[in-house]
Every structure is written in structure tokens, then in C-alpha cells.
Amino acid sequence: MNKILAEINLTDAPVGRIFDFGDSDKTIEDKYLADWVLPLTPHKYWQRQSPYILDEEEDVGTVLECERSVEAAMTTGSMDWGDYIVESRVRVIGQGAKGGILARYQTSRHYYLLTVECSGRLVLYRRDNTEWHVLAETPLEVDRRRYHTLGLSVEGACLRAYLDGVEVFDVTDGQYLTGGAGIHNQGRVRFEDVKITGGGNESENYEIRRTARANRAAEFQSKFPQERFLARYPKPNWPHEVSQLRRVGPEGTWGFLMYNSDSVFSAEFASRYGSGTIPRVGVSDTEGNLLWGQEIPIRFPYAIDVDGDGREEILGIMDDERMVVLSSENGEIINEAPLPSSCPFQGHRGQRIAPDLFPWYPADLSGNGRQQEFVIKDDRESRGGRTLWAYDGSLNLLWAAQVGRPRYGHRLAMCDIDGDGREEILAGFHLFDADGNLLWKCLETELNDDDHVDEVQLGLYGPNQEPRGCGTNGDDGFFILDGGSGEVIARHNAGHVQGCSAGNYLHDRPGMDYCVGTRWGNYGVLSVLDTEGELVKMWQPDKVSQGGPAVRWTGDGRDFIFLSTSEEAFGLWDGHGNVCVRLDCPELPSKGSYGIQKGRGDVMDVDGDGCDELVFTYPDEAFVYKASD
């Protein structure tokens, strides 16, 4: 006898919106959809509405509908699910829409899909990232006023598809042998009576697989030093929401640069995601003493040692008109200069620049071995920009430069890749020397549709430490570039790629590797490419992350990917998709954060031993962890 593994039972469910992340009332979701997630919908931090509603249909009852012409999905289960049957009644409403059921879900880009296409066919797909393999298909006269009952049975490598109770496909495909289940649509579609059932032994088999996987993970993790608690730093009772451990304490010791969420955004973004308070900035030591704190109209506070004395000053934008440098000792303004005017492509003529999110980039442009200069960019409305400006530590303009297409996005990158002691700057797919001269631009990417490069990295990442640049250009993909010429070495498509980092993530082979994170529409999908640009692994540790920084955890040349966006993914991962360090961290009040939230994790060498520690900051205190001995 089959047992219900999961279902969407909407009996007595009220009609209305569901998964509206701007609404704090989740009673409907908790009652009727508790074990279901929306992998293609933005994280609740962004307060977006999902495309799904509950509606009443005559002679049917309450149904689940995607009311917008978008791709959407709801999934449940885990990678330990093996053999089961997915069933649902499906009504394709929108012209050109598609609606169906998922099985053996690996990531939001890897699964089996049985779907009704309004164009007139029933298709069984195996999706493998960008490739949609048709395993079977048959013509189907689609009546947008009626439901079809779909069923997909997966048992080992055998896939059987059913339409209105009749078997239509019997296919053998062993690509995916376990995984979750769910529904999927493109366009306006209704679902009713969604159910996943397993045979009498499936629950027992699920537990066997889950236990075996946990045992394998524990054995694997035993090979790596797990975390040990290093320090707890108290913080003063001074209202703030964000803090960073920086060299702002007396004589350049560690201290906290503290500010509220409204200081992190432009005025426009603060109105959407801030706390509605006056921007404030303060500094404390690591013993909980407030050195100073003040309400001051400063945005984007950032610690940088502009005078080379070993203690970082605080750079910020004041009144949206000028750059200021604050003393970390007392908060006094010690220098200021007007913000540059907008370039010809951003804002109105002569208007001051209006950066968003990450405007400051310290750099060693003089070759003195310290990052005392900085570059500022203007990515107005978080849509990328065309001009960048370089300043010395005294706020004197050194140069300005412009990029073509694609524009730079949220991040720039600095590294001395030619060995002259001065750092080059990668902005979008354009490389500049320390004097602002364009060294190269990637001609191939000028033809891309996506207009900006969200994140870039620059370093000696080649197989023999050759210079490489890399960047994520949205739907056009992730690019690895020759650092000497800008020529494309490799390209990887994985949806809207947005985050990237570089490190020695593949511990069984030499060289630096690349971790690429996908965002809009495929949240949490990660890809790891080796030093040559070959894809090694794609997986989805959660439905949030777009990657993480490299962590020098062991001091032996191996790096790990730090993921902290959810408790599900919380840990240090290798490039094969394995959790190497689970990060129990029992001292933490909570685990997993996204956006401007409590518990954000930072990577830095706190004790100066050449290895990285993990620093988690909360409003009242911060916690530091390092590798166990």
C-alpha cells in the first residue's frame, strides 16, 4: 500500500495570496504548505510577492494557481527520496503556457519534468542545466478549460508517465536516481490535488539512505579540522544593526565599526530596505566600550587606513554630496571633498554620483605596499555604471576612467598581476593600470545582452599562476579571461549568474578554481569550475546563496567555500559539493543570515597566524571561530 510522502491538500483553505514575503502572517502557508518551498522566487528579505494564489473554481474547489506569465515551481522532499509517484491535476490556462510535475529534483536546473504544453503536446524532459533532453513526447489536444491528471512514477532507472490514468511513456534513464518532487509551470497554470506517494518500504528506504548519507558525511568531515571557539567580543549598548570587525581600535587594534541599515544603502534603497532611522555611525573596542557614536547623515561607512599609521579611518558619503574621512578615535571629520559629478551616462548632467551598495575599493596604486588609495564607482540604482574615479588618501583625484559594454556591476577587483608593485583594476570586463590607462577590454563580451557584470575577481589563477580575470554577466554567463589580453578562456552558463570567488576548492588537483553562484530565477545553484574552466560540479545547498568567499582554514594551501545564508547550508564546502566543516557553533544565537541581518559571517585573519577565522556579528556581541588544532 502506498504511503503519502507529501501533498497539497487545499480542503477548506481560504482564497487569496500565498507566500507574500511582505506579509508577516504565515498561518495559511504553515497549515497547508508547510513543507513546500519556492526555489525560483526571491528570498523573503526582498519582500516580493510570489506568483501563486489560492482561488476558488466552480465544481472543483480551492485550487493553486500561478497567476502571472513567469516560470515558477514549488518543491518538497530531499535528495534521500528514491522511488515514488508524483500526481497532480493540471490545467494550462495561459496561451503558450506549460504546466507539469517534477521528480528526482536535484537543483532548480536538474530534474525530470512531465509537462503539458499549450502548443499541443505532453513531454517528459530530463533537464541538465541548459540542456532539455526530450525523453518522450506525444501530441495532446489541449483544452484550456479542463484539467488533465498527470502521474510520474520513478523506480530505479524506470520512469513511467501517466495521462488521465493511462500509461503513455515507459522510459529508462538513470541520470537522477534520487531527489525531491514538486510542480512546475511557465505561464498561467492551475494545480489541484498534488500528491507524492511511495511504496510500503519507501519510508524505510528513505531513512536508510538518510542515515547512510549522514554517516558518510561524518566520516568525510572527520578528515578536516572542525571549528573551535576562539573569542567572544561584547559590544556596547548603542543602537545599531550592522557592524564590522576592523582595525579601528586604539593604536590600530581590533574594534567594531557600527552603523544602522539606513547607512548601508543609497537614500532610495534605504526607503525600501532600511529601518527608517537617521543614519548613525560609531566605534567600539572589543571589550564592549563605546569609543564614540553619533547620528550623522553618512552613508556607506567603510574602514581604510588612508594615512598609513596602522589605524583605519572611516570613509563615507555625507549628505549625498561629499566624501568625508572620520577619525576612528573620536568621529571628527578630518578631511572632505566633493563627490565627483555623474558621468555622461548616469543621472543628470552635473549631478553628483549616487552609488549603491559597495562604492569603495581600497587599492595600492602607488606601489608602497599598502592600500591607501581607493576607487569609487557610480552604480546608480544598482544597475551598474560606466565611470570610476581614483583618489589618494588625502581625497585628491588621481584619475577617472570609463568602461564600455558590459558595464561594471556591484564589484570591482584589484590585484598586481604584472609584478610591478602597483595594483591593476578590473571593472566589468575592462582592465586598467594603476594610472587609469585601459590595458584591454574583452571584445567578445561587448555582444552580450546583459548590460553589466555583477561580480569580478582578478588574480594569478591560471594553472601556472598566470594572470586571470573572471566575472558574472547575468544570463550571458560566467567568463574566465586571460589577464594579459582579455581573451575569453572559458564560459559557463547557469542561469542568471551573479556571484563568484576563486580559491583552491578542488583539493585533489592543483591550481585555483572558481565558484559561481546563480541568483534570479535559480537561487542557490552553485557551480565549480577547475583552473582550466571545465565544469566539475553543480549543486544547490540552499535556495538562497549565490556563493561565498574563499577561506584559508587549514594553512596548507587548501581553500573552502564559506556558505552562511541559511542553517541548511551553514558550513565550509569543497569544490565537489561536500560539506567539510559543518560549523556547529553552539555559542551562536542563530545560524544563517541573508542581507543586512543578525549573524552575518565575515572571513579574516584575526590572530595573525596566516589562516582565516570566521567572525559572526550580532547587535550585542560577536563570535570568532578558527580551525581546531
Image (cartoon, grey):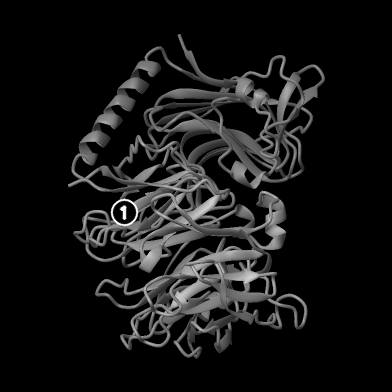
> Is residue 454 something one can see in this rendering?
no
Classify 164 as above or below 489. Answer: above
Specify the amino acid type for callout 1.
Glu
Q: Give the residue at x 67% y 33%.
A: 24
Q: Quadrant of residue 55?
A: top right
Front-most of 519 and 551?
A: 551
Q: Which residue is mark 1?
A: 613
Front-most of 86 and 451?
A: 451
Front-most of 54 and 101?
A: 54
Q: Give the residue at x 67% y 69%.
A: 380
Taking the image as shown, residue 557 lies to the left or right of residue 494, namely left
Q: Give the residue at x 61% y 58%.
A: 280
**How far across and down, in percent of the image, does residue 372 sit?**
43, 79
Q: Secondary structure at mark 1?
A: strand
**How far across and down, in percent of the image, does residue 417 sit?**
35, 81
For this orientation, the residue located farthest to the right is 58
Q: How many marks?
A: 1
**How far across and down, in percent of the image, does residue 473 sit?**
54, 66
Front-most of 546 and 5?
A: 546
